[in-house]
Image (cartoon, grey):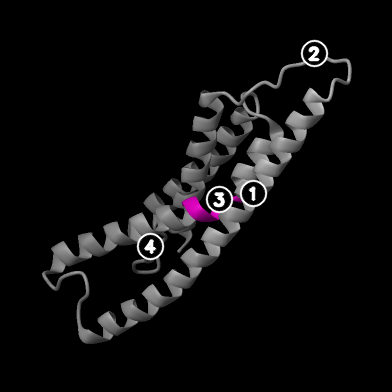
Amino acid sequence: LKCDKTDGKLNHPLMILTSLAYLTAMAASNEALHYVSYPTCVLAKSSKLIPTMIVGWLVDTYRGWKIGHGDGKGMLGNAKTNHHSHATSTINAMEWIGAAFITIGIISFQYIQLHNQQQRNQSGNGKSSEMEGDSPYGLALLGLSLFMDGLLGACQN
């Protein structure tokens, strides 16, 4: 994945990858709505910060490995690059901590909502409705959608 424009020309493979990532993410999340509840889909999509960070980190690691093995300078390059990567890792650590707190909040919210819904269903309001669980296929589609959202973010950087 090379994100630079060369000689004033657009990077068409990157544009195609970005378009496919966006279309796949949208199609997968829309299809997932047939197999999972709407709150599950909303909560999963609202926590897309974590997959975006993970996929971005994987793509950056791949780029660094590719550059390091392509020009013989190694992954860190010269001292200036090394200093820059140290500053980036400090910022990234803060981002990871923030993302962890956001994820904990989302999981807590989901647990509370599920617990409240189970209590309402058990209160004996005259209905014998069972709560349907979310389909593994629908959850896999949400996972694919989140992965493609992460890839889209990595392409835009």
Q: Secondary structure at mark 4?
A: loop
Mark 3 Cα-neighbour bin, 10 Å: few <14, some 14–19, many ≥20: some
As measured in the structure, the alpha-carbon distance from the residue carrying label 2 to the one carrying label 3 is: 35 Å
Q: Secondary structure at mark 2?
A: loop
- Does any portion of residue 101 appear in the rendered image? yes
| Residue furthest out toward the left | 72
**Residue picked out by circle 4:** 3
| Residue furthest out toward the front | 123
On the image, the x and y values in percent for residue 151 come to 44, 50
As measured in the structure, the alpha-carbon distance from the residue carrying label 1 to the one carrying label 4 is: 38 Å
| Residue 34 is a magenta residue | no
**Residue picked out by circle 3:** 48
Asked whether 22 or 132 is in front, the reply is 132
Q: Is residue 84 above or below residue 157?
A: below
Q: Quadrant of the C terminus?
A: bottom left
Which range of residues does the magenta coloring cover? Answer: 46-51
Q: Quadrant of residue 155?
A: bottom left
Q: Amino acid at mark 1?
A: Ser
Q: Earlier in the sequence, mark 1 or mark 3?
A: 3
Q: Quadrant of residue 54?
A: bottom left
As measured in the structure, the alpha-carbon distance from the residue carrying label 3 to the one carrying label 4 is: 23 Å
Observer-side mark, 3 or 4, equals: 3
Task: Determine the residue positioned at 33% across, 81% down.
Answer: 84
Q: Earlier in the sequence, mark 4 or mark 2?
A: 4
Numbered badge on residue 128: 2
Q: Quadrant of the N terminus?
A: bottom left
Q: Is residue 27 above or below residue 71?
A: above
